Image: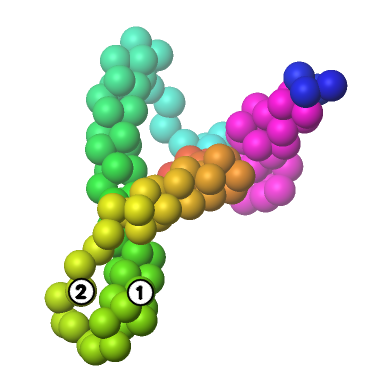
């Protein structure tokens, strides 16, 4: 029973054919991709590794920025509650950073495939 739940979760999130879904959702996206330039498959394969590496670095930086933007107000609220004063440089406790990281990972796990579909298929071709 537990494995069926995991399989259903995987099929609802990260085990999807995003290309096919994107083309079904938007005829314009499909037409743009069909009319785009085609390159040698060996060159495409070679640059896949570079693209994955740079996308990983960019995602890490973007995620770190998201954590900072989400955690800073929470840290300020907790500091005001604990001290009763407004401190322009409120310390950020480690558990707050961990909370932000877990929230980011959970959000990516549950909703990240939609972001990848939009960026990877709909915006990239444009």
Instruction: Please rate how many residues cluster around mark 2, counting C-alpha atoms within 10 Å: few if below 14, some from 14 to 19, many from 20.
Output: some
What kind of colouring is applied to the model shown? Answer: rainbow
Most prominent secondary structure in the magenta stretch? Answer: helix
Quadrant showing the N terminus: top right
Q: Provide the residue designation for mark 1.
A: 78
Between the C-alphas of marks 2 and 1, the distance is: 9 Å
The numbered mark at residue 90 is 2
Instruction: Please rate how many residues cluster around mark 1, counting C-alpha atoms within 10 Å: few if below 14, some from 14 to 19, many from 20.
Output: some
Give the answer, above or below, for where 14 lies relative to 126. Answer: above
Q: Quadrant of residue 15?
A: top right
Identify the residue shown where x is 25% and y is 63%. 92
Front in this rendered view, residue 46 or 112: 112
Instruction: Determine whether label 2 and label 1 are within 8 Å by CB.
Output: yes
Identify the residue shown where x is 24% and y is 89%. 85
Give the answer, above or below, for where 11 lies relative to 110. Answer: above
Identify the residue shown where x is 27% and y is 28%. 53
Magenta-colored span = 5-31
Which of the two labelled residues, at mark 2 and mark 1, occupies the earlier sequence position? 1
Residue 120 shows in this picture: yes
């Amino acid at each position: 029973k537990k494995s069926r739940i995991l399989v259903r979760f995987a099929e609802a999130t990260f085990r999807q054919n995003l290309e096919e879904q994107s083309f079904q959702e938007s005829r314009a996206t499909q037409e743009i991709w069909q009319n785009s330039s085609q390159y040698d498959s060996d060159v495409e394969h070679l640059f896949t590794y570079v693209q994955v590496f740079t996308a990983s670095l960019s995602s890490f930086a973007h995620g770190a920025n998201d954590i900072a933007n989400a955690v800073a107000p929470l840290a300020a609220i907790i500091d005001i509650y604990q001290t009763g004063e407004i401190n322009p440089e409120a310390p950020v406790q480690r558990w707050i950073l961990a909370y932000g990281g877990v929230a980011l990972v959970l959000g990516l796990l549950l909703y990240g495939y939609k972001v990848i579909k939009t960026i990877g298929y709909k915006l990239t071709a444009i």
